[in-house]
Structures are given as structure tokens and as C-alpha cells.
Amino acid sequence: MSDESDPTNLLRELAFGYDRDLPFDAKTSPAGQGGGINVERFEITSRYDGRVSGLLIQADQAEGPRPLVLIGHPGTLDKSSDYVLWPAEQWVKRGAVCATIDQAGHGERARRPVAMEDFQRWPMRRLDQTLQTVVDWMRTLDYLSERPEVDPDRVGFVGFSMGGMRGAPFVGLDERVKAASFCISGASTLSDRGGAAGQLANALSDPGIYAPMMAGRDIQVVAGEHDDLITPEATQRFYDQLSEPRELVWLPCGHWDFMPQGIAPVGPFLERSLSFGG
């Protein structure tokens, strides 16, 4: 990171730091098979001894290291949602390996039902879960990079809604990710909440802060023209802070009807950026 004397950068180093040699204590088990696709559940240890549950999706008979696509699920959903698994199957059939995790507070890691209010009302809870999820993605990539089916030099990320919002700091900070597609996500619209502490929390978690850190990587933004949650203005503000190579795709939809048409431009982008499918 640039300017290590800057207090915000130092705070960011601390906030997203973790012990790189922490044992994974990985556990795996079959989670489904059919149509030429194999799904494996994995579980690893992240910081604070939290256990991260995930799914690895790959073709049954594929050989050799393949590009890895990490997929961030939307808020209130989880790693097993069709919102994640359906596009993963499309990309696996084209030659990738896909993986997704339950983000902090979701899926197997949820301690209570998740509501949309969680992302709009409480900036400190949002910050806590963002910090944890970013480190969880880094730990997941550490683990999967050691797997023989994964090519660690061809790693991509796709984040839907909250998955993209939490994924932006991960992509910005982790240069191992070579390409990323942010779908129905954008810069924060909550900077005026929570007083001074809330403003600092926003400075650590706002996707727009991390957009310039993605310079040199292929970045795609896919957005709905009528999105009433992540507004077109927030999407544009995030995109404007990106460097080339970048692309912005507007679709005639809102937030809640993004699927299934929303992934149409994502597959070709991933194939081009990570060299598979052809």
C-alpha cells in the first residue's frame, strides 16, 4: 500500500491484517454431484479462530490447473443459493473452477436471521462483517491456491450486490486477483451515518476507496439502469474511480430482477481476462 505513514493506511493494514502462517485445519466433504459437475464443501480457519465454510465447484473429469473464479453472494443469501451456483455451473462447464464462501453473518455462520436493515442502519456491524469477510476471502485464496486443480496465476472474482461491496476491498488489497466483475454494486451511499466513528468505518469499507487500488487489473462493472438499492449514481461513482482496463455494462433492469440476464456479459469477460473457454 502507498504512503505507510498515512494514519488511514496504517489503520487499514491493521484492520485487514492476519497471520499468514495460521494453520487452515481444512476439512472437506462431498456436497453434490451430477451433470458432470462435482461440488465439495470445505471449511477452514480464519482469524479469531472463525471457521469459514465454502463450496468448490468443478468439472468431474477436468485435468490440470484451471482458472479460479471466486463468487460473492448477495446479502441475505448464502453460498448454496442458486444465485451463486447457477452461474458457477456455467463457468465450470467452460473450463473454470469456482468457489464461494458463506460471508460473515450469513449461511452456516449466521447467528440470527439476516435482514436488509443490517446493511443500512448499523455502520459498525457492517464494518465488522466487511473486515471479517475480506480476510476470509484472503484466507480462502491462500487455501485454494495450494489445491492442484487451481492455477494461482489466473484468479478472478465476481461479486453480486453485497458480495461486490465486500469484495471490493478484497480485490483492491489482494493483487493475486487478476480480474473482477462487480454486479449491482457500487460506492457507498452511507457516509453520513454514525458520526465520526461511522465516517471512519465508511472510509475502511467504502468500495469506492478501493477502486483506485485495482489499477492494472481487468475490472468490469455490470449495473441495472433502474436499480433502486445500489443507485446508478453510486455505481457510476465507483466506476469513475477505476483505471483502465475497465468496462461498464448497463442493463435494462433493477436490483431485484438482475438475474438471469445479469450474468450474460460476465462469462465472456472472465473467459477473456483469465484465458479459458475458447
Image (tube, rainbow, N blue to C red):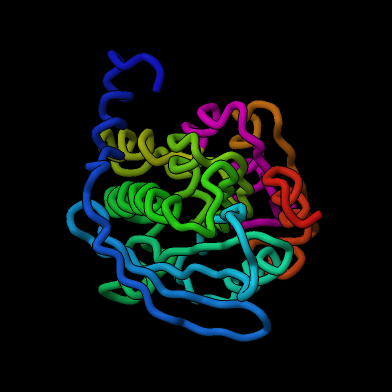
Q: Residue at x 49, y 57 (%)?
A: 148
Quadrant in the picture for the C terminus? bottom right
In the figure, is residue 107 to the left or right of 221?
A: left
Classify 143 as above or below 213: below
Q: Nearer the viewer, residue 130 or 237?
A: 130
Q: Position of residue 273 (x, y in %)?
A: 70, 43
- Examine the image and state in which quarter residue 263 appears: bottom right
- One can see residue 242 in this view: yes
Residue furthest out toward the front: 63
Q: Residue at x 49, y 39 (%)?
A: 176
Q: Nearer the viewer, residue 70 or 200?
A: 70
Write the start and end of the magenta stretch as one range.
208-236
Q: Position of residue 136 (x, y in %)?
A: 35, 53
In the figure, is residue 116 to the left or right of 238?
A: left
Q: Position of residue 51 (x, y in %)?
A: 26, 64
Q: Nearer the viewer, residue 211 or 126?
A: 211
Classify 215 as above or below 204: above
The magenta stretch spans residue 215: yes
Q: Position of residue 257 (x, y in %)?
A: 69, 69
In the figure, is residue 1 to the left or right of 258?
A: left
In the figure, is residue 223 to the left or right of 16?
A: right
Q: Residue at x 28, y 75 (%)?
A: 112
Q: Residue at x 36, y 56 (%)?
A: 121
